[in-house]
Image (cartoon, rainbow, N blue to C red):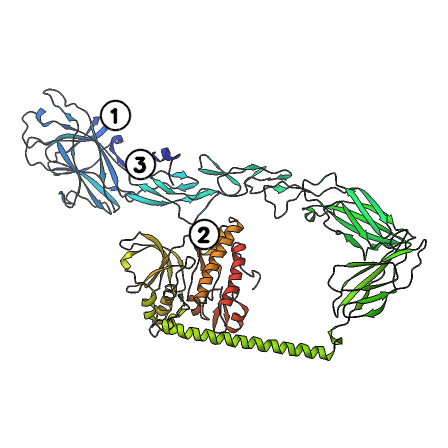
């Protein structure tokens, strides 16, 4: 990630002084050599700013072979690997000194010596280049000229030297004069460090570099979260500057918005919210909602207002509708049509519907819930503001209550608001028809008759017969002018429910009670019909058997001739091809020597090609690491490396390598790829492709709700493709679960973990696996027949795939979460 907006802040260099003689006024008490006749002299003087300073001067230019040393006191390095020495000094030009010899120098040498304690003395360490480490020979850029009878004058030289690398507790700095006339005005020892900086919501602490480029781990600022599994890092350079490359996968959490140029996450103020993580800003609460406290990821609905579980938090809250208005009833005999107007208030929603409740109140009797009424189109969830009620009985007052509801009515503790209307049916309609008699019956017809009905007024115009097959629903209607009817097209041996009502000039009367009648069944057929059925069935079965035998013979002959023309099997035991080119999986445990299976199916990798970077997990046999594989002539790639822990038995080694023998036989984009094995050194390793997002179950839980259903189905399609390939290879996985599916950076899912599940024993500590016959199995993912009889097939893998589908669509929820 490039560093742009905050780059200027990275140029602010920090340094920490270890020594600075410019501000010292007392004796520095540095050590000189030779001790008896020292040429270096400590004096007080004035610097160019006319401040009093302690300086060291030497001017032994008239005698050859000068070797004059000046050493500082012990300087603790304070964790710095490299220290910088800023020297301020003057050097007198040799030609301006009267009677100077050729031994005059215009340079001096700088050395350092490391120690864990202050152990230097007048004689130790010896005053020579070894054990002292030379830093540089320093020459003056500006020379001072000395004129007769005047003080030497000239510019002050400033030189900064790099001292190191340092590893011990502290060090001494030493200066060697070999015949120069110079003054050491001040010495400042310091080290550089990278200042604390915040980049894209990622904080990197103040850091002292210990190498040329030093990686520094960052952390998300308060109220920010990581958006990937990559470690947060930036590089601190030895010169105290941050490098321009950084991994800063942090963003503001829900309820917080970016502030101060992406360096802080500020809580959304009361009355505002932010629903999801990211760099978006806070929003005002939707209508009829509030967030009383800062940092809210959603706004709570006000009292009396609601939001359904399927509605996003960005949607405004709504309330229940007011009551329906202006109910009108039109009655025709036993039928009533009710109509009404919409409520004045719909609660802020467009999903208003209506429920109809009915109570029947006969004369001088208490009211009861209505029974045996038919509603068209229905009595609940009405969208149109009209309903037809059929089956009303005469002489009864009906009370109809129409309730207005919407999507949040179920969330309210108050009953829906409603409007009622009372209607009384006509007393002059015909009475219900109750005495229905069966006069004849056949396998497909029933003939019924009933007594004549005398209405209170007028005469009977016709009768309406309502009937349906018992238990099937879906009423049919027949009309007749006589007091009898024949129902035809009925099913043999079926029971039918029948009701009849009469119609006069006043209207329909009510339906009478339900009566049940049955057609003749198959038992009434003749024995001849039964015999003919049996003989016909037997003949058909014989013909089918003969057809199968003929086809089998033809196929076997063709296969025999084909086998003579083409050899369809290899010389390896158990490995063969089905048809033309379909490879079949070989169990490595069928080999007499399992190591032969490893050599057959897995490629041996030179251990020098592999570099382990970090441990990312632990497996049944050892650690799982991320590393780099660099094969000569090929591009360097990231790989996953499974290692076999020390102290293993030969059996454990065979079982560990068996997974490589299995994986090496597969080649499919949705099966984890084996890159090779390392068996010639310790530890033994299996090298596979690296899947950046790790196991599917933990990846989904980490990204709960972040993927669309289309993306989830795409993951499932990849898993299904891989399992179809394994099934075609005749390989049974036995432990298919989201934890054994790996996900790469492109959300491609690949099946993994081959062979290890078969070795789980009773002493395994993994709680995912439950004791069963002969070992432990993942009971939540295992098919019933596999649990009961240890029978594993592609069908049991299909069962496990169904559980994986549930895991994926629920974003990694544990199957049967309430099962102990």
Tell me if 812 is positioned left or right of 618 in this view. Answer: right
Earlier in the chain: of badge 1 and badge 3, it is 3
The image's mark for residue 51 is 1
Tell me if 331 is positioned left or right of 256 in this view. Answer: right
Cα–Cα span, label 3 and label 2: 46 Å
The image's mark for residue 320 is none
Tell me if 199 is positioned left or right of 458 in this view. Answer: left
- Mark 1 vs mark 3, foreground winner is 3
Q: Secondary structure at mark 1?
A: loop
Q: Secondary structure at mark 2?
A: loop
Which residue is situated farthest in the top direction here? 149
Q: Position of residue 733 (x, y in %)?
A: 45, 66
Cα–Cα span, label 1 and label 3: 23 Å
| CB atoms of marks 1 and 3 within 8 Å | no
Q: Nearer the viewer, residue 9 or 744?
A: 744
Q: Nearer the viewer, residue 545 or 185?
A: 545
Quadrant of residue 351 in the image? top right
Cα–Cα span, label 1 and label 2: 69 Å
Reading the image, the residue beneath label 2 is: 747
Reading the image, the residue beneath label 3 is: 15
In the image, residue 690 above or below residue 537: above
- Mark 3 vs mark 2, foreground winner is 2
In the image, residue 491 above or below residue 539: above
Earlier in the chain: of badge 3 and badge 2, it is 3
Tell me if 66 is positioned left or right of 764 in this view. Answer: left
Q: Position of residue 139 (x, y in %)?
A: 15, 32
Q: Quadrant of the C terminus?
A: bottom right
Earlier in the chain: of badge 1 and badge 2, it is 1
Q: Position of residue 298 (x, y in %)?
A: 58, 42
């Amino acid at each position: 990630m490039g560093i742009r907006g905050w780059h200027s802040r990275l140029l602010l260099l920090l340094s920490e002084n270890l020594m600075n003689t410019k501000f010292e006024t007392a004796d520095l008490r540095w050590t000189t050599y030779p001790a008896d006749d020292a040429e270096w002299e400590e004096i007080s003087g004035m610097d160019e700013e006319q401040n009093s300073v302690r300086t060291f001067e030497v001017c032994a230019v008239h005698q050859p072979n000068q070797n004059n040393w000046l050493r500082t006191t012990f300087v603790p390095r304070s964790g710095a690997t490299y220290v910088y020495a800023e020297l301020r000094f003057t050097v007198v030009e040799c030609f301006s000194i009267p009677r100077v010899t050729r031994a005059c120098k215009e340079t001096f040498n700088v050395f350092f010596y490391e120690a864990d304690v202050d152990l230097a003395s007048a004689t130790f360490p010896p005053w020579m280049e070894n054990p002292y480490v030379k830093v540089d020979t320093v020459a003056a850029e500006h020379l001072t000229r000395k004129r007769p009878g005047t003080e030497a004058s000239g510019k002050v030289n400033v030189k900064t030297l790099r001292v190191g690398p340092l590893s011990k507790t502290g060090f001494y700095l030493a200066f060697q004069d070999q015949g120069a006339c110079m003054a050491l005005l001040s010495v400042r020892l310091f080290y550089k460090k990278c200042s604390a900086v915040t980049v894209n919501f990622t904080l990197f602490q103040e850091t002292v570099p210990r190498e040329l480029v030093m990686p520094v781990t960052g952390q998300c600022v308060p109220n920010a979260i990581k958006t990937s599994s990559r470690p947060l890092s930036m590089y601190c350079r030895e010169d105290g500057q941050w490098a321009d490359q950084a991994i800063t996968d942090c963003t503001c959490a829900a309820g917080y918005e970016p502030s101060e140029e992406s360096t802080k996450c500020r809580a959304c103020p009361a009355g505002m919210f932010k629903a999801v993580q990211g760099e978006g800003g806070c929003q005002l609460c939707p209508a009829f909602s509030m967030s009383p406290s800062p940092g809210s990821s959603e706004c709570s609905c006000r009292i009396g207002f609601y939001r359904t579980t399927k509605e996003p938090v960005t949607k405004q809250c709504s309330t229940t509708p007011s009551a329906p208005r202006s109910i009108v009833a039109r009655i025709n005999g036993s039928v009533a049509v009710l109509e009404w107007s919409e409520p004045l208030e719909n609660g802020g929603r467009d999903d208003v519907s209506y429920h109809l409740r009915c109570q029947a109140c006969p004369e001088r009797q208490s009211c009861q819930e209505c029974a045996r009424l038919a509603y068209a189109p229905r009595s609940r969830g009405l969208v149109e503001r009209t309903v037809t009620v059929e089956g009303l009985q005469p002489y009864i007052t009906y009370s109809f209550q129409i309730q207005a509801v919407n999507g949040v009515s179920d969330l309210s503790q108050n009953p829906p608001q409603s409007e009622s209307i009372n209607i009384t049916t006509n007393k002059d309609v015909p009475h219900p028809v109750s005495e229905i008699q069966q006069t004849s019956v056949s396998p497909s017809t029933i003939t019924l008759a009933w007594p004549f009905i005398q209405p209170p007024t007028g005469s009977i115009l016709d009768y309406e017969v309502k009937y349906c097959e018992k238990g099937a629903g879906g009423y049919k209607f027949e009309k007749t002018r006589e007091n009898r009817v024949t129902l035809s097209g009925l099913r043999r041996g079926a029971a039918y429910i029948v009701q009849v009502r009469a119609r006069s000039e006043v209207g329909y009367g009510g339906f009478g009670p339900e009566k049940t009648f049955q057609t003749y069944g198959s038992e009434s057929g003749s024995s001849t019909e039964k015999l003919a059925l049996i003989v016909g069935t037997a003949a058909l079965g014989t013909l089918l058997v003969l057809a199968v035998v003929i086809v089998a013979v033809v196929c076997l002959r063709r296969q025999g001739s084909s086998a003579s023309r083409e050899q369809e099997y290899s010389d390896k035991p158990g490995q063969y091809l089905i048809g033309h080119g379909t490879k079949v999986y070989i169990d490595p445990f069928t080999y007499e020597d399992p190591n032969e299976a490893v050599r057959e199916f897995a490629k041996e990798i030179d251990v020098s090609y592999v570099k382990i970077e970090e441990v990312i997990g632990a497996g049944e046999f050892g650690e799982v690491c991320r590393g780099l594989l660099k094969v000569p002539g090929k591009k360097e790639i990231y790989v996953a490396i499974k290692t076999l822990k020390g102290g293993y038995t030969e059996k454990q080694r065979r079982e560990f390598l068996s997974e490589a023998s299995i994986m090496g036989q597969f080649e499919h984009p949705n099966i984890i790829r084996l890159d090779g094995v390392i068996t010639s050194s310790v530890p033994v390793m299996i090298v596979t492709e690296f899947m950046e997002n790790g196991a599917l179950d933990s990846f989904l839980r980490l990204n709960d709700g972040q993927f669309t259903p289309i993306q989830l189905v795409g993951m499932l399609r990849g898993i299904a493709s891989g399992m179809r390939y394994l099934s075609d290879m005749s390989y049974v996985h036995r432990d298919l679960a989201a934890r054994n599916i790996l996900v790469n950076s492109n959300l491609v899912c690949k099946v993994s973990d081959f062979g290890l599940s078969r070795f789980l024993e009773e002493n395994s500590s993994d709680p995912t696996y439950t004791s069963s016959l002969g070992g432990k199995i993942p009971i939540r993912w295992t098919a019933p027949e596999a649990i009961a009889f240890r029978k594993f097939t592609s069908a049991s893998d299909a069962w496990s795939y169904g559980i994986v589908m549930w895991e994926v669509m629920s974003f990694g929820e544990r199957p049967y979460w309430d099962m102990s």
